[in-house]
C-alpha cells in the first residue's frame, strides 16, 4: 500500500509557477512581514510615554463628554484615571525627559469640526521628538512639526524650539 502511494505521488504532476508569480508572493510576504512590526517607536520610554498620554487623553475626552466641559485640572481627571488604573505621583510625568507633562486644562476642542489641536505634550522632548497629546490622539512630532501644530488660543509651542541638526 505504501508503495502504491509513493508511485502515485511520483506520477502526479504539479502545476509549475512562473517567476512572476513567485516574485508576487515574495513581495506580498515581505510587505506582510514589515507591516506586522507595529508603529515606529524609537525606544521603550517613548512607548511608555505614548501609553501615559493616550490614557490621559482618553480620560480628558471622557470627562469632556460626560460633563460637557473641559477638565480644569488634574483633580478633575483623578477619578477617571483611577478607574483606568493610573495612580501615583508619576501619572503626569514623562519618563523620557523627567518633567511633568504640559497639559492645557480648560480647553474644549471641537471634536465634530475635525480640527486636531494640541491638548498636551512633553515639557522638553528628546532627540528632536516630542510626544504630543492632541484632540485626535497621541503622536510623535519633530520640532518643526510641533512648531506648526495647531495650539489652543493662548497657547503655543515652547519658546526657543529649534530643530536639531
Image: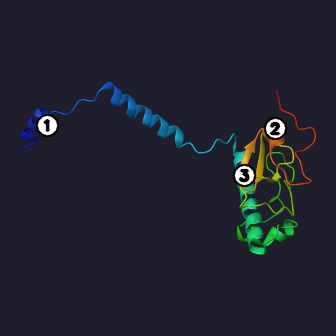
- For the C terminus, the image quarter is top right
Mark 2 and mark 1: Cα distance apart in space: 64 Å
Mark 1 neighbour density, 10 Å: few (under 14) some (14–19) many (20 or more): few
Q: Residue at x 87, y 50 (%)?
A: 99
Closer to the chain start, of discs 2 and 3, is 3
- The spot of residue 92 in percent (x, y) is 82, 58
Give the mark toward the camera: 3 or 1.
Answer: 3
- For the N terminus, the image quarter is top left
Residue 9 numbered mark, or none: 1
Say which of 47 and 150 sits in front. Answer: 150
Residue 138 numbered mark, or none: 3
Q: Residue at x 83, y 67 (%)?
A: 71
- Locate residue 137 relative to residue 123 in the image: left or right: left
Mark 2 neighbour density, 10 Å: few (under 14) some (14–19) many (20 or more): many
Residue 17 location, quadrant: top left
Mark 2 and mark 3: Cα distance apart in space: 15 Å
Say which of 70 and 140 sits in front. Answer: 70
**Disc 2 marks which residue?**
143
**Mark 3 touching mark 1, by CB under 8 A?**
no
In this figure, which colouring scheme has been used for the structure? Answer: rainbow
Secondary structure beneath dot 3 equals strand
Residue 59 against residue 41 in the figure, above or below:
below
Amino acid at each position: 500500500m505504501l508503495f502504491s502511494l509513493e508511485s502515485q505521488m511520483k506520477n502526479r504532476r504539479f502545476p509549475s509557477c512562473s517567476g512572476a508569480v513567485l516574485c508576487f508572493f515574495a513581495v506580498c510576504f515581505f510587505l506582510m512581514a514589515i507591516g506586522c512590526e507595529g508603529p515606529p517607536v524609537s525606544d521603550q520610554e517613548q512607548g511608555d510615554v505614548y501609553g501615559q498620554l493616550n490614557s490621559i487623553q482618553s480620560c480628558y475626552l471622557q470627562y469632556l463628554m460626560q460633563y460637557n466641559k473641559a477638565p480644569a485640572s488634574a483633580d478633575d481627571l483623578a477619578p477617571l484615571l483611577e478607574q483606568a488604573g493610573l495612580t501615583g505621583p508619576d501619572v503626569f510625568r514623562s519618563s523620557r525627559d523627567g518633567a511633568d507633562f504640559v497639559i492645557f486644562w480648560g480647553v474644549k476642542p471641537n471634536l465634530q469640526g475635525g480640527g486636531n489641536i494640541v491638548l498636551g505634550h512633553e515639557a522638553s522632548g528628546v532627540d528632536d521628538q516630542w510626544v504630543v497629546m492632541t484632540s485626535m490622539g497621541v503622536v510623535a512630532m519633530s520640532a518643526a512639526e510641533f512648531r506648526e501644530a495647531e495650539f489652543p488660543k493662548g497657547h503655543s509651542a515652547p519658546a526657543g524650539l529649534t530643530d536639531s541638526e
